[in-house]
């Protein structure tokens, strides 16, 4: 598009950044005046309560950044994207830009909207979103999608290396700030009604500057040991960038570039980039096999004899299962909006294998509590844990929460942090408090008895698995 006199509109979704924001830099290059708008679909965040807080903060912070560039950020409530755009298109005094969001419904809507814009002769441009490779670029030689991570990532890495863009694109300052829409919302009106999120305020700063700073610190202090340290929840051995990546405060191309420029190309760097690769793989999976967003990727799990047990489910959510590593993880999640990956696997496995509760219940609860919730990684993570996903952990491999605790939280530091009731237990008993005898510790009162016995639960799970 050449420079034109119409206003440029940028439809902001998960793109709260200036660096590598391809749609916004196009808009501000092609126009003297650009307005950014965020469409808040009224029911979208009903079961993503924690993310309401992140979204609200992101909007406040990004609005201030954009103001310095003479760009207005306007938040518009809508019950239907289609209705909103049908009205907007009638105005015909704008060109519009946005970045892709790699979920089937969003991509389908892109097709619909581009058709409408073309029919009405409105200029538009859809740009690359927060991903290294476009989904359709990575395929097997026979044109079908990858179902296994290792060959997927080998191909994806190579493809990306051969196509890295040469130049960074910038967001340009605009001539004047233009208010374009009526009927706007304030950022604060997005906050959840319950105020448990207030704890997040001292833990996270949802903006681009913090994301870039966190990446720098991680590369300076942690990446060299990442391969090992990433498994230990008591260490802060991972980047904790996931919510920033989810909301696009940092683009994965920026992460890639900083990693390859890192002074030593060691295993830590390779492993870290491979985790970014898992995220890409998950996007590829949900777009090539969209049924897995709501159902089992592997159809044989449709007949799995899941059990409904609201008492167990509630104990799991509250971190009161009697298994310290599981409970610590669930409490970390509720308090901080984030949980360590190792513990996500252990707590998830406990729900689906020890309690035989459908992974969909866990997926739903994580969706509500995680600041980094992403449709692709949450559903793929849960199906990996359950064994029903592509390239998943086999169902019969059942994590033992006691051994996992003893291996990955040897001195119980992580457990003691999140379960203060156990802080005086000797390390030897920290992952099996039911073996500890003391007048000062009353099991069943101070901390729950295990809601199921590991060995019994394990064999019950294996029996259930035989049925499919
Ligand atoms: C049951 C379950 C549910 C999960 N739900 C989500 C989710 O909703 N959103 C989400 O971003 N991740 C999810 N994960 C993956 C992983 O736990 C988090 O990405 C990771 O813990 C984020 O912490 P970090 O930023 O410190 O990761 P780091 O180890 O620093 O990794 C860097 C980045 O790579 C990506 N990444 C790392 N590990 C994985 C992984 N296993 N799968 C996919 N991407 C990964 C993330 O974007 C992460 O920020 C889930 C995992 C499980 C087992």
Image (tube, grey):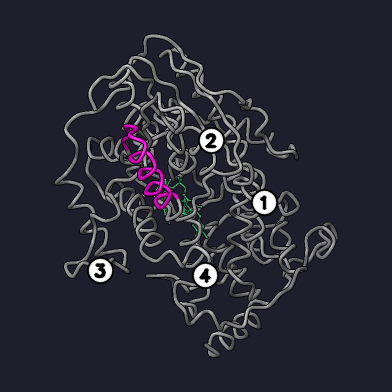
In percent of width and height, residue 323 lies at 67, 65
Marks 3 and 2, how far apart at CA: 35 Å
- Which comes before the other along the chain, label 3 or label 1? 3
- Mark identifier at residue 295: 4
Marks 2 and 4, how far apart at CA: 28 Å
On screen, residue 43 versus residue 213, left or right, reads right
Residue ID at (63%, 85%): 460
- Mark identifier at residue 331: 1
> How packed is label 2: few (under 14 Cα within 10 Å), some, or many (20 or more)?
some
- Mark identifier at residue 144: 3
| 421, 382: nearer the viewer | 382
Check contact, mark 3 vs mark 1: CB within 8 A: no
Assign a secondary structure to mark 1. Answer: helix
Residue ID at (31%, 38%): 127
- Which comes before the other along the chain, label 2 or label 1? 2
In the rendered image, residue 114 lying in the magenta stretch gets the answer: yes
Check contact, mark 4 vs mark 3: CB within 8 A: no
In the rendered image, residue 298 lying in the magenta stretch gets the answer: no
In percent of width and height, residue 77 lies at 60, 34
| 240, 15: nearer the viewer | 15
Nearer mark to the viewer, of 3 and 2:
2
Residue range in magenta is: 106-125
Q: Which residue is mark 2?
A: 39
């Amino acid at each position: 598009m050449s420079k034109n006199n119409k206003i440029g509109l940028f439809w902001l979704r998960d793109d709260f950044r200036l660096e590598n924001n391809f749609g916004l830099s196009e808009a501000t290059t092609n126009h003297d005046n650009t307005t950014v708008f965020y469409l808040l679909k009224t029911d979208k965040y009903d079961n993503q309560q924690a993310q309401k807080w992140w979204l609200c903060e992101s909007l406040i912070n990004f609005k201030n950044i954009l103001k310095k560039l003479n760009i207005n950020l306007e938040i518009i409530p809508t019950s239907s994207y289609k209705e909103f755009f049908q009205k907007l298109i009638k105005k015909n005094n704008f060109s519009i830009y946005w970045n892709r969001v790699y979920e089937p419904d969003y991509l389908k809507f892109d097709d619909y909207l581009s058709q409408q814009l073309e029919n009405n002769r409105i200029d538009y441009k859809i740009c690359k979103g927060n991903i290294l490779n476009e989904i359709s670029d990575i395929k097997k030689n026979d044109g079908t999608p990858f179902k296994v991570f290792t060959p997927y990532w080998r191909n994806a890495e190579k493809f990306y290396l051969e196509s890295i863009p040469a130049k960074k694109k910038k967001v340009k300052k605009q001539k004047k700030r233009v208010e374009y829409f009526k009927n706007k919302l304030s950022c604060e009106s997005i906050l959840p009604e319950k105020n448990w999120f207030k704890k997040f305020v001292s833990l996270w700063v949802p903006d681009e500057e913090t994301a870039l700073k966190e990446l720098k610190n991680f590369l300076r202090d942690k990446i060299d040991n990442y391969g090992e340290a990433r498994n230990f929840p008591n260490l802060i051995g991972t980047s904790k960038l996931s919510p920033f990546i989810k909301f696009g405060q940092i683009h994965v191309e920026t992460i890639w570039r900083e990693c390859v420029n890192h002074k030593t190309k060691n295993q830590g760097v390779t492993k870290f980039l491979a985790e970014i690769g898992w995220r890409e793989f998950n996007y590829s999976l949900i777009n090539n096999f969209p049924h897995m967003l709501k159902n089992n990727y592997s159809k044989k799990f449709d007949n799995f004899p899941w059990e409904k047990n609201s008492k167990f489910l509630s104990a799991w959510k509250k971190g009161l299962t009697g298994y310290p590593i599981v409970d610590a993880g669930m409490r970390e999640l509720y308090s901080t909006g984030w949980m360590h990956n190792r513990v996500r696997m252990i707590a998830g496995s406990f729900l689906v294998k020890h309690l035989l509760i459908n992974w969909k219940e866990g997926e739903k609860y994580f969706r509500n509590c995680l600041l980094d919730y992403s449709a692709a990684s949450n559903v793929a993570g849960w199906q990996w844990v359950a064994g029903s996903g592509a390239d998943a952990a086999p169902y019969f491999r059942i994590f033992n929460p006691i051994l996992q605790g003893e291996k990955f939280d040897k001195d119980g530091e992580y457990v003691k942090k999140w379960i203060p009731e156990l802080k005086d237990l000797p390390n030897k008993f920290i992952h099996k408090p039911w073996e500890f005898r003391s007048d000062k510790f009353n099991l069943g009162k101070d901390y729950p008895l295990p809601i199921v016995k590991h060995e019994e639960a394990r064999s019950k799970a294996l029996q259930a698995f035989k049925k499919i």
